[in-house]
Image: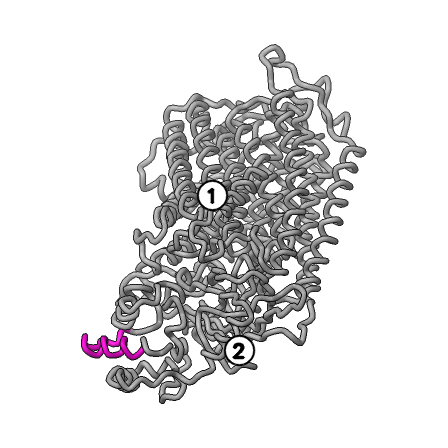
């Protein structure tokens, strides 16, 4: 490949007033700036939804607690869930995809830069609409009010009879609007990966991160649309006298469940695939080996993409489907375990025989592997439909999906922050603070979410604002709440690290991790339009080839 | 994973109040719960072994292949993959999944497709915001929140078959020791069955978020010895007590909107939005388990339901103290 670190003259370095800077960020169509906007926006909501979680945990610290009322508690878990999924996890992953995909395929921007900006601002508007419900939920004349229908908004709870006022409308419209943003991003990533790859980068040479985001984008196109359709139908029910989900007029409550979960379950994979993407980049670099079984990893990803479309009703084992339907969805759900298991084995295979460097990104990646293994195994338990009849809707399932989302996705994201922050800012994050962050978060995470499985087994349902002091419930809930505080402290350290290192961190240089993909061949942060001349690649690890001309990958692939 | 299991069983062993069952899913007391428990243990063992093997490999890799200072600057052998190894770790999970699928579908079939014997008791369960209505169609009984069923002798089983309906939003019937959950969904008829052999009071609660007071939609199943059950049935089938000493309270009850929602057999009260009160005093709790059924609690509940269960659909009737006392006295005669 042709290597170039020639920076195009960067306008950012000029001294400018804050209004000019603001104008530049608001009107930008640069994939890197939009990526950072996505990430910053999501971090803000991470803090908000994290505070909501802390209030929930204070309320559940002991039995019959009165820290918040029933109504407030129900709003809190609705807002916490909706915010974390739609306005933290999705935008933060889109942010990284936006930032990294063009750089890794040797492109100068996304295929549709304006669509990219449009998608971001739609997502941002969605989050604002959701939180505007606090002011506008009862109209402008009443007291504030957020939706309290749970993040699945099951029919008929979301019907006007049970959810008067406008709080559910803000929920609906927030998801509609941000859903359009997500579809825009999905289209954009697919177009970018299809059309913008540099010379030599055929599909078999794309970094796994790009592959995983490609499959994720395809899934977005297929599964966000049913959610959007369902939201429109709900609006028709609420305002135009429709009866899709209006059970009092003969509508179907289960229809909503199907619509929601045909989105809702693949959504988990939409979140986990980009997390796999981070792990698939971090593990090889810090094991000093190429990814083990690249073609199998790609195949497993595509397989997950397909199978995950056929498992949605495992969220509905208790709704009284017949034994054949229950068996079908149990089988498909267990099948997801096969490609996922293959992925874990391949990451292990990558570490095997390597020279593992325990930098902070790798620590988080190892944490991910351990926790994702457990999350996968509790997932198998939940796929066993009869076992699920006991476990679902209890704290066990809450522990399970937090194991996936916090133990898996969030750990992978933290790893990604430590790994790519130097590329995005030109500064290293502090390793010392990073280790504090990692270990405190590991301790807090396991205190909270390991223990949380047990009250579920002891019969504690989810979404209850108060509980009777049944055997074991109180002590376990106290430990869970303390763990949540430990996690919050760890996140504070992380946020401090982000801020402090931006000003005081060590200079990163182009390639601080001695890595192999194209983003490390340009300056940190990369110049506008990334590459002065578009690179040409001959293998999956173009920068390795450059560093080892005597033994390039292109010889073996 | 096994440490977790041990914890759970230890917690279950330490039930402080022997009047009630625990709500532990690993202490099954009915055939469906027992079948689920057996399958669960099998799945826990399989996943436990997988965990031990994979976590062991991960731990081994982390220790064995950690970067040493001596190797600094030297790259390890660059290995790209191996078809044989990939094949091995694809085939093994496939086989495990096949085994799990066979075990799972067998239990699904055994529980869901079990035929209803002629000796079975039918109960219709109707979920309301935020309480349970139980109807015994063949026995002509309507009651609330505390379901009575006969103990089922394994030699001569008398299981109870539930028909699950909802009057408003989704709910879920969950008594962990007796079986898994089944949702109560409007416009839909769901079914489940129980056959506990050991008499006692089994606790549960609504498991599907159904609105503001989802948390206080508690549930009791009283499993009675057959003679006790027969006595209970007889008591429930009697018309409500008409006690001349509480006629004042009866008048207040029947002349306010209490009767729009509550029914008392043999009187003009025939509302169906709230629990049937004909035999209120045969129940140990009020407000769907939110409070003990004591005179003081009953009075407070009538005076201000939000004090016990904020967000419940029963309105405060703003009765005078004298009327409150009278109504409470009347309700206390409804044995």
Badge 2 is on which residue?
B136
Is disc 1 on the same chain as disc 2? Answer: no
At x 71% / y 30%, what residue is drawn?
Answer: A538
Q: Relative to A95, is B300 on the left or the right?
A: left
**Is residue A182 found left or right of A71 in the rendered image?**
right
Q: Give the magenta part as a residue range.
A: B316-331
Q: Quadrant of the N terminus of chain A?
A: top right
Q: CA distance from mark 2 to mark 1?
A: 63 Å
Q: Which residue is mark 1?
A: A34
Whole-percent x and y of residue B304? 26, 69
Visual colour scheme: one colour
At a point 68% along the width and 50% down the height, the residue shown is: A334
10 Å crowding of disc 1: few (<14), some (14-19), many (20+) = many
- Nearest to viewer (mark 2 / mark 1): 2
The quadrant in which residue A157 appears is bottom left
Residues under numbered marks 2 and 1 in contact, where contact means CB atoms less than 8 Å apart = no
């Amino acid at each position: 490949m042709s290597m170039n670190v020639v920076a195009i003259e960067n306008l950012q370095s000029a001294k400018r007033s804050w209004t000019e800077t603001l104008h530049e960020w608001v009107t930008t169509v640069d994939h890197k700036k939009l990526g950072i906007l996505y990430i910053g926006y999501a971090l803000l909501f991470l803090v908000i939804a994290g505070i909501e979680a802390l209030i929930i945990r204070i309320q559940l610290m002991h039995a019959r607690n009165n820290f918040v009322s029933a109504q407030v508690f129900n709003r809190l878990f609705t807002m916490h869930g909706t915010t974390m999924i739609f306005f933290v996890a999705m935008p933060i992953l889109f942010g990284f995809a936006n930032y990294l995909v063009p750089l890794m395929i040797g492109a100068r921007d996304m295929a549709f830069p304006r669509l990219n900006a449009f998608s971001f601002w739609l997502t941002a508007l969605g989050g604002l609409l959701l939180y505007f419900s606090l002011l506008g939920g009862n109209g402008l004349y009443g007291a504030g009010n957020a939706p309290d229908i749970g993040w699945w908004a099951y029919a008929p709870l979301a019907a006007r009879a049970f959810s008067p006022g406008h709080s559910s409308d803000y929920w609906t419209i927030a998801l509609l609007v941000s859903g359009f943003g997500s579809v825009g991003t999905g289209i954009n990533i697919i177009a970018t990966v299809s059309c913008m790859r540099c010379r030599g980068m055929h599909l078999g040479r794309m970094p796994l991160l790009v592959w995983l985001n490609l499959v994720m984008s395809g899934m977005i196109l297929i599964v966000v649309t049913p959610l959007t359709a369902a939201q429109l139908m709900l609006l028709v029910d609420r305002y135009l006298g429709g009866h899709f989900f209006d059970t009092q007029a003969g509508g179907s409550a289960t229809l909503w469940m199907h619509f929601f979960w045909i989105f809702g379950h693949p959504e988990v994979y939409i979140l986990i695939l980009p997390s796999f993407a981070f792990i698939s980049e971090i593990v090889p670099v810090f094991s000093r080996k190429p990814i083990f079984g690249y073609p199998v990893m790609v195949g497993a990803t595509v397989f997950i993409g397909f199978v995950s479309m056929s498992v949605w009703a495992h969220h509905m084992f208790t709704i009284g489907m017949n034994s054949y339907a229950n068996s079908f969805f149990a089988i498909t759900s267990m099948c997801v375990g096969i490609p996922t298991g293959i992925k874990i084995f391949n990451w292990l295979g990558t570490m095997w025989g390597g020279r593992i460097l325990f930098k902070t990104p790798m620590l988080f990646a190892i944490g991910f592997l351990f926790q994702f293994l457990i999350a996968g195994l509790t997932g198998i338990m939940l796929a066993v439909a009869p076992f699920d009849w006991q476990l679902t809707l209890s704290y066990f399932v809450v522990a399970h999906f937090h194991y996936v989302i916090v133990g898996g996705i969030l750990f992978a994201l933290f790893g990604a922050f430590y790994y790519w922050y130097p590329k995005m800012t030109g500064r290293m994050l502090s390793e010392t603070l990073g280790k504090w962050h990692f270990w405190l978060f590991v301790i807090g995470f396991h205190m909270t979410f390991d223990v949380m499985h047990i009250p579920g087994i002891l019969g504690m349902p989810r979404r209850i604002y108060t509980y009777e002091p049944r055997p074991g419930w109180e002590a376990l809930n106290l430990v869970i709440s303390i763990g949540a505080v430990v996690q919050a402290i760890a996140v504070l350290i992380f946020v401090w690290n982000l801020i402090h290192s931006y000003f005081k961190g060590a200079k990163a240089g182009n390639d601080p991790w001695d890595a192999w993909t194209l983003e490390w061949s340009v300056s940190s942060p990369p110049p506008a339009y990334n590459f002065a001349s578009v690179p040409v690649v001959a293998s999956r690890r173009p920068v390795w080839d450059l560093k080892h001309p005597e033994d390039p990958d292109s010889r073996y692939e | 994973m096994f440490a977790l299991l041990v914890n759970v069983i230890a917690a279950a062993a330490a039930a402080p109040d022997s009047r009630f069952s625990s709500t532990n899913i690993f202490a099954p007391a009915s055939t469906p719960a027992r079948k689920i428990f057996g399958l669960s243990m099998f799945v826990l063992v399989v996943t436990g072994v997988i965990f031990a093997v994979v976590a062991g490999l991960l731990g081994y890799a982390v220790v064995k292949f950690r970067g040493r200072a001596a190797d600094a600057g030297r790259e390890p052998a660059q290995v790209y993959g191996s078809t044989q190894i990939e094949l091995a770790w694809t085939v093994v999970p496939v086989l495990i999944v096949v085994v799990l699928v066979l075990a799972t579908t067998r239990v699904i079939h055994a529980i869901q497709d079990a035929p209803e014997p002629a000796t079975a008791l039918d109960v219709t369960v109707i979920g309301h915001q935020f309480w349970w209505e139980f109807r015994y169609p063949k026995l002509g009984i309507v009651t609330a929140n505390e379901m009575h069923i006969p103990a089922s002798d394994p030699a001569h089983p008398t299981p109870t078959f539930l028909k699950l309906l909802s009057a408003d939003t989704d709910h879920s019937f969950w008594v962990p020791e007796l079986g898994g959950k089944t949702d109560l969904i409007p416009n839909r008829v769901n079914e489940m069955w129980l056959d506990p052999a050991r008499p006692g009071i089994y606790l549960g609660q609504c498991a599907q978020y159904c609105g503001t007071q989802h948390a206080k939609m508690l549930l009791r199943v009283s499993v009675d010895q057959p003679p006790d059950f027969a006595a209970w049935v007889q008591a429930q089938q009697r018309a409500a007590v008409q006690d001349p000493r509480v006629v004042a309270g009866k008048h207040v009850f029947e002349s306010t909107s209490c009767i729009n929602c509550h029914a008392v057999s043999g009187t003009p009260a025939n509302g169906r939005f709230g629990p049937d009160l004909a035999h209120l005093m045969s129940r140990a709790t009020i407000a769907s388990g939110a409070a003990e059924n004591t005179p003081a609690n009953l009075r407070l509940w009538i005076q201000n339901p939000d004090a016990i269960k904020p967000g419940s659909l029963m309105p405060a009737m703003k009765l005078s103290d004298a009327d409150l006392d009278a109504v409470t006295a009347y309700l206390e005669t409804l044995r």
